[in-house]
Image: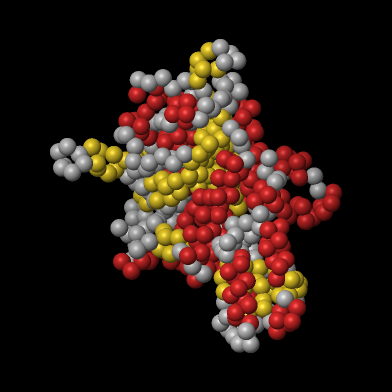
Amino acid sequence: MGNGKGAFFYFCAMAKDDQFKKVVSHAKEYGYIFGSSEIYDGLSAVYDYAQNGVELKKNIREYWWRSMVYMHQNIVGIDAAILMHPTTWKASGHVDAFNDPLIDNKDSKKRYRADVLLEDYCEKLEQKAQKEIAKAKKRFGDAFDEEQFVSTHPRVVRYREQQKEILGRMAKSLGAEDLADVKALIEELEIADPETGSRNWTDVKQFNLMFGTKLGASAESATNLYLRPETAQGIFVNFLNVQKTGRMKIPFGIAQTGKAFRNEIVARQFIFRMREFEQMEMQFFVRPGEELKWYEYWKETRLNWHLSLGMGKENYRFHDHEKLAHYANAATDIEFDFPFGFKELEGIHSRTDFDLKAHEEHSGKKLQFFDPELNKNYVPYVVETSIGLDRMFLAVLSHSLQDETLEDGSSRVVLKLPSIVAPIKAAVLPLIKRDGLPEIAQEIVENLQWDYNVVYDEKDAVGRRYRRQDAAGTPYCITVDHQTKEDQTVTLRDRDSMEQVRIHIDQLKEKLKKSISYEHWLKNVL
Ligand code: ATP
């Protein structure tokens, strides 16, 4: 139990960046996210999705599901249980190795992930390098050759080399369980507690992130279980069931979305790192030897999915893993430029046959595929795509929240959510509350609500209602006025451009369909 309401606002006080504070408070004010059980002071790093948040989250999930399952004939979905046989987690390696290295500061009593302290240090080096690059770009203008600059400028070269050295040594030490060296590295770099500046550190220890629970009525006979720390294992244990009943032929994929639980050591970045969160994962089963081809395919396809939402190419980058997990032969993260810098949003991993083989060994069941073309059985290799739904939510929310100064000098707060994922697609507004205008507006709501989540709003002057809908992220406002009674036209106002056009009520559905259809948004993914 934790610092609850405190936890919700905690980051506000700590945030280096104003934008992030704004995102957190906007999320609460506009009904996107509340701290969990706030009336009891909450639970740290656990959050509830509010009336608008639940819609945005559902829409992002749907956008992912359609691109993975509906748009790939060889991918099907499942929904496995959160509770699984405990041997699952022995086989997957989570019981023995799902640890994070923790370190405490003896003065501030604050707890940190040792690897994150080192990664943040490297991020600062990278920021310094970026500053040099930006300066030079400005100085040289069109003649600037970035590739040449970064490979020859002594300070940039040094910053990059240092990062490589630090991350390389950290990966080696963690891999060899040499926690003393991880501490030594933190001390050598003189890394201080980011909150207090103290360098008085404890030793580094390993901490298992799985939540335990019990199944059964009496204490003696109860079985120890875990809340799943990832959804992927629910896919692996069902590999054969799905392959047989779905008559799937390799290559094929199984997709799943659902809750996962991790007892994170440090969870201070709002919904970026939660203790209960949701994943959207897909395991793609392929012929051994073809995994790297599919790995490249999924890297490109997943990046295209992100780009299709129109949040700017420059806000994404790949971060290839320096040191691979023992079972992986390639791995990368898609990082997004959150208000606190580039951080992992999605992982794409070539996991070889590690998981299926481990489950074969522990269950004694064969988890193989008979390949008619090769005329032989084998354990398929797996390429995984794994994205956190809550992190994606944060990416969308933080990118969309903007303060705009308008031509007349006034300003507005606008949430420029991609319309396909916006919670409310349109607000229908009678200009005034009489003369039959509310009735016409209600009729429009009733006509549109079959296909779209729309709201009716008659309170306050229309300008204030526009601002309210802008801040809530509603892409369209439909206004009914006296002219509507004469010629059945309404004004359709676009949230982003604020342009208003007059269209006939009968054209509304068609107009919304054009800009808010999956076809319109997803067509660039493949
Ligand atoms: P990190 O290094 O940030 O802890 P990870 O590498 O452990 O993440 P994976 O195990 O690869 O993450 O999980 C896949 C995805 O699940 C991540 O890319 C992220 O989007 C999401 N995710 C993981 N842990 C959390 C969490 N505690 N809260 C929210 N989302 C999470």
Q: Residue furthest right?
A: 143
For this rendering, which residue is in front, 181 or 395?
A: 395
Q: Residue at x 50, y 20 (%)?
A: 369
Task: Please give the count of numbered marks on the rendered protein.
Answer: 0
Image location (x, y in percent) of residue 195:
44, 59
Asked where in the image residue 238 lies, by quadrant, the reply is top left
Relative height, residue 489 to residue 109 (above, below): below
**Residue 81 in view, yes or no:** yes
Relative height, residue 427 to residue 7 (above, below): below
Image location (x, y in percent) of residue 400:
62, 61
In this picture, residue 170 sits left or right of residue 220: right
Image location (x, y in percent) of residue 353:
49, 24
For the N terminus, which image quadrant?
bottom left
For this rendering, which residue is in front, 59 or 315?
A: 59
Q: Which residue is drawn at 61% across and 67% down?
A: 447
Image location (x, y in percent) of residue 232:
45, 37
Relative height, residue 288 to residue 161 (above, below): above
Q: Which residue is drawn at 63% across and 77% down?
A: 440
For this rendering, which residue is in front, 515 or 225?
A: 515
In this picture, residue 309 sits left or right of residue 136: left
Asked where in the image residue 288 lies, by quadrant, the reply is top right
For this rendering, which residue is in front, 180 or 486?
A: 486
In this picture, residue 335 sits left or right of residue 220: right
Q: Residue at x 46, y 43 (%)?
A: 115
